[in-house]
Image: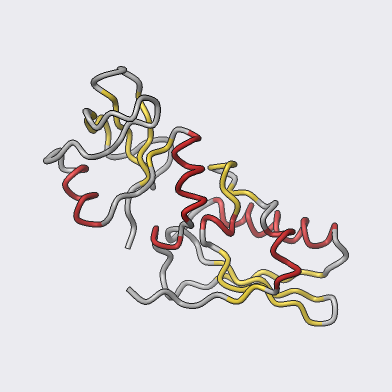
Amino acid sequence: MVIEKTHIDAHLIPILEKVTDPEIPVLSILDMGVVRSAIENDGKVLVKITPTYSGCPAMDVIGDDIITALEKEGYQATIELVLAPAWTTDWITDRGRNALEKYGIAPPLDPDADKEALLGNKKIVKCTLCGSKNTHLVSQFGSTACKALFKCDDCQEPFDYFKCLK
């Protein structure tokens, strides 16, 4: 898959790294991959963001949080929603995937493995607490629509799995 190249002005990165996903506060919007570009021109910043899925309620909050963060630093900000190319879990950074796991959400697998896990064909989703792959699907939907609920058969703990979206 070809991922559209992003352009973020370097001096804006530290500001945007402080803006977190409201549903997963350990992830910055940069690690989540929703920021497609952020370009400053004479104190005005245009930030283009892509929703993780159509109708994602967090996008309004993210847009407002970006504006607030940039205004605190003296910039005027405009948010533009970009729908194509569609967001994919491939855009989550390695740092973001590690943060997900530490937070208790299993990061997305590749599409084929995701399908096998969600259909219950293979035990390949790793428990975020004990690391066991002896886990099973409890529900196709977890705390949000983009997650599934799993349970570890070894430590008996439930946990979310972030579904692969391509």
In the rendered view of the protein, which quadrant contains the C terminus?
A: bottom left
Q: Residue at x 39, y 62 (%)?
A: 88
Q: Residue at x 21, y 50 (%)?
A: 113
Q: Is residue 75 left or right of residue 6?
A: right
Q: Quadrant of residue 110?
A: bottom left
In the rendered view of the protein, which quadrant contains the N terminus?
A: bottom left
Q: Residue at x 64, y 73 (%)?
A: 8
Front-lying residue, 59 or 115? 115
Report the residue that reaches farthest toward the left.
121
Report the residue that reaches farthest toward the bottom.
41
Q: Is residue 12 left or right of residue 155?
A: right
The number of numbered discs placed on residues in the rendered structure image is 0
The x and y percentages for residue 126 are 30, 35
The x and y percentages for residue 121 are 11, 41
Q: Residue at x 48, y 35 (%)?
A: 102
Identify the colour scheme used. Answer: secondary structure
Vertically, is 123 above or below 1?
above
The x and y percentages for residue 61 are 64, 52
Vertically, is 87 above or below 153?
below
Vertically, is 59 above or below 23?
below
Q: Quadrant of residue 106?
A: top left
